[in-house]
Image: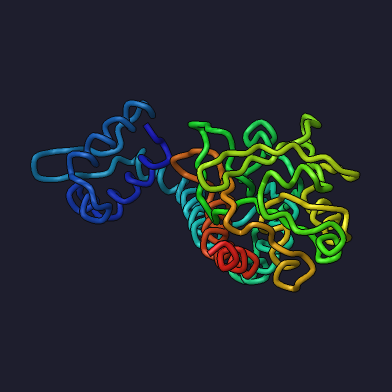
Amino acid sequence: MDTLKALQVAQTVLRSGTFSNAARVLGVRAATVSKSMAELERQLGMRLFDRSTRSLAATEECRDLLTRLAPALQQIEDVLSDREAAPHGLVKVSVSGPFARMTLMPGLPAFHDRHPDIVLDLRVENRRVELINEGYDCAIGVAPPPDSTLVARRLARLRPVLCASPAYLQRFGTPTHPRELAAHRCIGLRSEHSGVLREWPMQWGDERYCHRPAGGVQTSDPAAAAAAAEAGCGVVFVGVHHVVDAVVDGRLVWLMPALQTDSFDLVIYYARRELLPPRTRAFVEHVLATVPQAPLLQRCSVMLG
């Protein structure tokens, strides 16, 4: 039994005079109030109310107990009300660099105007974190591994694209079919965790290809790979969000737009709990309302059609 709740019920009974009146105030049945008081009396080892078929009277011990506890019960109610009215505290968030800078940061002033007592600890890192083991409240990034203990909410659907700079294409020609990539300098992207060079899976019509990049530049950072492509180092294959602005500005050319590549989801994920802390819930709701509308993601959507 929840002793605090039972004491609050007892206080309501004392003020209202009967179990029935207290039940109406609390929005429960009179039998529920009566059972709660019987359990509290057993736990405390004292009789709180003298009952008869026609009346109910608080004992002297009950009045003394509730009088002494009244300030503490009121203080607890005030604290809980404050927490409900104004979420506060620290929210620890993992977020990958491009999404932190381009989709999350622009909306933070509005979030802090609404929730001035919430402190965001934003860890900008390009990795999948162990949410619970590392003490994170939530994370923003590509879809996490399947895990029944996590809730993942999609913010955007993205996919990788092929790009190269106009200067590179003028010098080496423009590939128009996946087979032609073998004759080009291709900027390699290594896994940040394993160091393995990632292949480029793609589909052209009914044909499936898996190109292994070879060239003079390899990196573990997609943004660095995109920058290398802008500098004319070769063809790059990275998420559209890394290159969309360079394509719009003409610094990069989108190659083979009809090429089909595997999409991936940008999500916010957090531990599956019946009741999220109010501060975490407030941040998750903010992200769900603002990030999908971020200009960067809108430009990606327009580019991909």
Q: How many marks?
A: 0
User: Within the image, what quadrant is residue 303 found in?
Assistant: bottom right
Residue at 39%, 35% (x, y): give it.
2
The answer to whether residue 92 is visible is no
**Residue 177 location (% of width, % of height):** 66, 50
Nearest the eye: 128 or 230: 230
Residue 101 vs 110, above or below: the answer is: above
Residue at 26%, 32% (x, y): give it.
38
User: Within the image, what quadrant is residue 41 found in?
Assistant: top left
Residue 17 vs 291, above or below: the answer is: above
Query: Would residue 47 appear left or right of 216 to someone viewing this image?
Result: left
Which of the image's four quarters has the N terminus? top left
Q: Residue furthest left?
A: 53
Query: Would residue 30 appear left or right of 195 to someone viewing this image?
Result: left
Nearest the eye: 111 or 293: 293
| Colour convention of the picture | rainbow
**Residue 103 location (% of width, % of height):** 66, 63
Residue at 66%, 33% (x, y): give it.
130
**Residue 69 location (% of width, % of height):** 46, 45
Query: Would residue 271 appear left or right of 33 to someone viewing this image?
Result: right
User: Within the image, what quadrant is residue 252 found in?
Assistant: bottom right
**Residue 124 location (% of width, % of height):** 76, 50
Nearest the eye: 68 or 16: 16
Nearest the eye: 201 or 157: 201
The answer to whether residue 62 is visible is yes
